[in-house]
Amino acid sequence: MADLGHIVVGFAEATIGAGQQLLEGLTPGITLFPAAADTRDTTNLSMALQHAFTPLSALAFLVFVLLYIPCVPTIGALMHELGWQWTSLTMALQTILPWLLAVAVYQGGLLLGWQ
């Protein structure tokens, strides 16, 4: 029973920590949980990403990645089901539309004063 208690406590701590990290990620530039912000790891990857992306450019990149062309097997399935013309149109739309939306998010953020 003692092990079960440790598991429940560990699960609760992990859930609370994950929720705090999620809220910190959704509010760039605002520290909601100061203790959680002090214990972050500073790995080479996280440092490189902090230098490469601003929160606004990361959001625009996220919009693009969530909407662009899916994986190669999906394109193959589209080709098999719809033919090359519809697949080409789909690929063109799933390249142009995400780019336009990412640019709109980035430029809109700049207009709102986010940087």
Image (cartoon, rainbow, N blue to C red):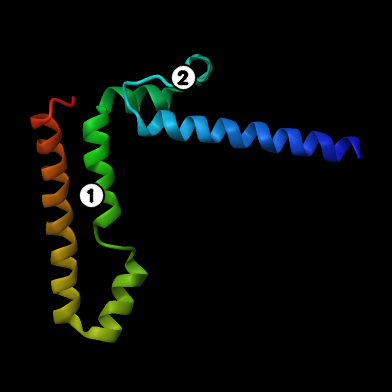
Going 19% across and 62% down the picture, which residue do you hit?
A: 94
- In the image, is residue 19 above or below residue 104? above
Image x and y of residue 113, in percent: 13, 25
Q: Which mark is residue 13?
A: none
User: Furthest-right residue in view?
Assistant: 1
Q: Quadrant of residue 67?
A: bottom left
Q: How far from the left and from the top, in percent, is residue 100?
A: 11, 51
> Mark 2 — residue?
42
Residue 20, given in percent of the width and then of the height, sits at 50, 30
Q: Write down the quadrant of residue 5 in the picture.
A: top right
Label 1 amino acid? Phe
- Closer to the chain start, of discs 2 and 1, is 2
Q: From the viewer's perspective, is residue 92 above or below residue 48? A: below
Residue at 43% over, 21% down = 32
Q: In percent of the image, x 28 and y 22: which residue is there?
A: 51
**Secondary structure at numbered mark 2:** loop
Which element type, helix, strand or loop, lies under badge 1? helix
Q: Position of residue 114 (x, y in %)?
A: 18, 26
Q: Which residue is mark 1?
A: 64
